[in-house]
Every structure is written in structure tokens, then in C-alpha cells.
């Protein structure tokens, strides 16, 4: 992975907090997908006063809190990468897979900052273009996640290098 070479330390496994954050972010993204529909309705009501959502904003608040939480977790994750490093790709990873995984991981990091920023700006300024950007970025995130999952499955099933162990095994 490209990030790994930038760190002075090359560990044999992910830091346990890094692993914890990976799975918390997965969980909060699922919550964002659920609360996304609700904030979309409130956003529509904000833009068009003739539409009402019966004053129900609690789900929107969850969406905002969840998004800000992801932003903070990603900032901590970058700090952990710099401080503890990340393991090098498994021996069975070929050059194409290395390139793809670096691209997808970098993309996920970038987009998980860009999505909350566009969301917050869209909501606070009631800006339709920014909300469209938010939705487009969310869809690109889904593409990254699908590619990520195909990559993990390929490692696990065809390369047989048990890559899952790296992101589930709780070492120091
Ligand atoms: C990584 C964090 C976030 C994720 C994964 C996420 C995901 C989503 C999803 C799935 C939707 C529904 C899109 C649709 O209806 O097609 C949505 C809509 C929306 N989100 Fe987020 N969101 C995040 C952070 C935020 C934050 C921090 C805010 C701040 C207010 C926000 C504001 C909005 C708004 C205003 C909409 C409605 C957009 C519209 O209908 O035009 N989001 N988001
Ligand atoms: C069930 C779903 C998921 C599984 C089974 C999974 C599995 C894995 C595995 C095995 C690794 C280690 C790869 C390696 O060692 O090179 C990893 C790393 C990673 N995963 Fe996932 N993942 C899942 C969902 C997600 C989601 C939803 C995201 C974010 C949107 C994500 C983002 C990342 C990133 C950025 C890395 C690189 C390591 C890092 O910098 O944190 N994963 N994942």
C-alpha cells in the first residue's frame, strides 16, 4: 500500500484502534444510509415551504451527528496510520491488486471527508448543487465499497491469504 511506504514503521498487523475504527465506520455508514432518506425529506421541506415533514427532524440530527462522527474517526485514522503505520500487502498481492487497493483505500479516505463537508455545507446554506454533489459522492463511495468487497473476497477465496485476519485480529 502506498501509505505504508510513507511511514517509517512497517508493522505486521493493523493497530487495534485502527481495526476498531474500520468497523465502527462500516456500522455508521449503514446508519447514514438509513437516516439519509429522512434528511432528504427535511432538506426538501427546507427548500420548499409548501412541503412539510411534520416537524420531525430527529432523524436528520442523527444523520448530521453520524456524518460528523465519521469525519472525526477518519481524522483519527490518519493519525494512527502516521503513528503506527499499516502492514505491507500480503505476499500473494500482485502489482495490479496493489495499485487497485491503494487507489480504493485512498479514494475512501478522501471521500469520507468530502461527503460530510458537502453535506454540512448543503444543509447549512440550503444549496441544491451541494446536495447533488453530496449524493454523487455517496454513490461513488458505494462503488468504492463494492470494489473493496470484491477485492477482499478475491484475496480470501482465490489467493487464500486470509486477509480478513488482518482487519479482525486484535493484537497489541
Ligand atoms: C460520511 C458521512 C455521510 C454519509 C455516508 C451520508 C449519506 C447520505 C445518504 C445515503 C443520503 C441519501 C441520498 C439520497 O437520498 O439519494 C444523504 C442525504 C443527505 N445528507 Fe448525508 N451523509 C453523510 C454526512 C452528512 C452530513 C454531515 C450532513 C450534514 C448536514 C449531511 C446532509 C445530508 C443532506 C442535506 C441530505 C439530503 C440531500 C438531498 O436530498 O438533496 N450528510 N446522505
Ligand atoms: C463487510 C464489509 C467489509 C469487509 C469484510 C472489509 C474488509 C477489509 C479487510 C480485510 C481489510 C484489510 C486489507 C489489507 O490488509 O490490505 C480492509 C481494509 C480497509 N477497509 Fe474494509 N471491509 C469492509 C467494509 C469497509 C467499508 C464499508 C469501508 C469504508 C467505506 C472500508 C474501508 C477500508 C479501508 C480504507 C481499508 C484500508 C485500511 C485502512 O486504511 O484503514 N471497509 N477492509
Image (spheres, rainbow, N blue to C red):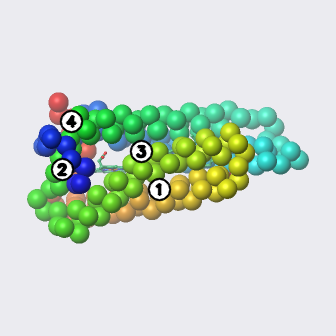
Residue 94 has which mark? none
Residue 26 has which mark? 3
Of badges 2 and 1, the one in the foreground is 2
Residue 84 has which mark? 4
Q: Which part of the image, by quadrant, shows the C terminus? A: top left
Q: Are dots 3 and 1 in contact, CB under 8 Å?
A: no
Which residue does the image show at 37% across and 63% down from the upper left? 147
Closer to us: 71 or 159: 71
Of badges 3 and 1, the one in the foreground is 1
Q: Which part of the image, by quadrant, shows the N terminus? A: bottom left
For marks 4 and 1, the one nearer the N-term is: 4
Real-space Cα distance between discs 2 and 3? 25 Å
Residue reaching furthest to the top: 172
Q: Is residue 163 above or below residue 59?
A: below
Real-space Cα distance between discs 3 and 1? 12 Å
Indicate if the residue with disc 1 has its beta carbon within 8 Å of ligand 2: yes
Real-space Cα distance between discs 4 and 3? 21 Å
- Circle 3 — which element? helix
Which residue does the image show at 17% across and 62% down from the upper left? 93
Q: Residues within 10 Å of mark 4 (few under 14, many from 20)?
A: some
Of badges 2 and 3, the one in the foreground is 2
For marks 2 and 4, the one nearer the N-term is: 2
Mark 1 sits on what residue? 141
- Circle 2 — which element? helix
For marks 2 and 1, the one nearer the N-term is: 2
Q: Is residue 140 above or below residue 84?
A: below
Real-space Cα distance between discs 2 and 4? 12 Å
Residue 56, how many percent across, how many down? 75, 35
Q: Are dots 2 and 3 in contact, CB under 8 Å?
A: no
Can the viewer see residue 165 in this picture? no
Q: Residues within 10 Å of mark 2 (few under 14, many from 20)?
A: few
Amino acid at each position: 500500500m502506498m501509505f505504508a511506504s510513507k511511514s517509517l514503521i512497517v508493522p505486521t498487523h493493523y493497530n487495534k484502534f485502527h481495526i476498531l475504527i474500520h468497523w465502527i465506520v462500516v456500522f455508521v455508514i449503514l446508519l447514514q444510509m438509513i437516516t439519509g432518506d429522512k434528511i432528504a425529506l427535511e432538506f426538501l421541506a427546507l427548500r420548499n415551504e409548501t412541503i412539510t415533514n411534520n416537524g420531525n427532524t430527529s432523524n436528520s440530527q442523527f444523520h448530521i451527528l453520524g456524518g460528523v462522527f465519521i469525519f472525526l474517526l477518519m481524522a483519527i485514522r490518519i493519525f494512527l496510520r502516521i503513528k503506527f503505520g499499516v502492514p505491507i500487502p500480503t505476499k500473494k498481492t500482485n502489482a495490479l491488486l496493489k495499485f487497485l487497493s491503494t487507489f480504493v483505500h485512498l479514494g475512501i479516505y478522501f471521500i469520507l471527508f468530502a461527503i460530510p463537508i458537502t453535506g454540512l455545507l448543503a444543509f447549512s446554506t440550503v444549496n441544491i448543487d451541494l446536495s447533488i454533489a453530496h449524493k454523487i459522492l455517496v454513490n461513488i463511495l458505494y462503488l468504492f465499497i463494492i470494489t473493496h468487497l470484491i477485492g477482499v473476497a478475491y484475496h480470501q477465496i482465490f489467493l487464500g491469504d486470509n486477509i480478513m485476519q488482518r482487519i479482525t485480529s486484535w493484537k497489541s
